[in-house]
Image: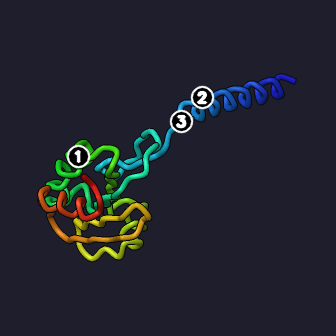
Amino acid sequence: MKLRLKVMGILVLLAVFTLVLLSANCGKALAQDKTGKSTVSRPSVFTPLVTFVEIGAASCIPCKAMQPIMKAVAEEYKGQVKVVFHDVWTQQGKIDAEKYNIRVIPTQVFLDVSGKEYYRHEGYFPKEQVVQVLKKGGVK
């Protein structure tokens, strides 16, 4: 009888713990930060005109130089451009690198509103040139 009570108590604790974890993440989506670690962010409520995909690595010097550019683009073109970073040294990043047929890092891939690639660049990409490519995709 005591063993049964202990087992029931443990099951109740596990159920409560699971509910707490699930409710904490309710309504949120997983994303990756610049180090490739999962972070929690709100799901996107807009359809971007352009998706700016950066495939690189957190430890790559030209990739690190792209981080402020990506952040500035995300802030300045909020609502028009979705900026995504994939770290090739993570498990998911390796899959993404294969998906986009990446040869070198960093590589920037620009997708139109339908998800079709319309521009690709390899290496460091200055902000002024990134903005020109965004404008080709309809960003104002």
> Which numbered tag is attached to residue 118?
none
For mark 2, give the secondary structure.
helix
Q: Which of the two discs, 2 and 1, labels the residue nearer the N terminus?
A: 2
| Viewer-proximal residue among 64 and 121 | 121
Sequence-first tag of 2 and 3:
2
Q: Position of residue 3 (x, y in %)?
A: 81, 27
Residue position marked by numbered label 1 in the rendering: 71
| Residue indicated by mark 3 | 25
Rounded to the nearest whole Å, what is the CA distance between mark 2 and mark 3?
9 Å
| Residue 50 in picture, x, y percent from top left | 33, 58
Q: Position of residue 64 (x, y in %)?
A: 18, 54
Q: Nearer the viewer, mark 2 or mark 3?
A: 3
Q: Secondary structure at mark 1?
A: helix
Name the kind of residue labelled 2 in the image: Val
Compared to 138, does 117 lie above or below?
below
Q: Nearer the viewer, residue 53 or 106?
A: 53
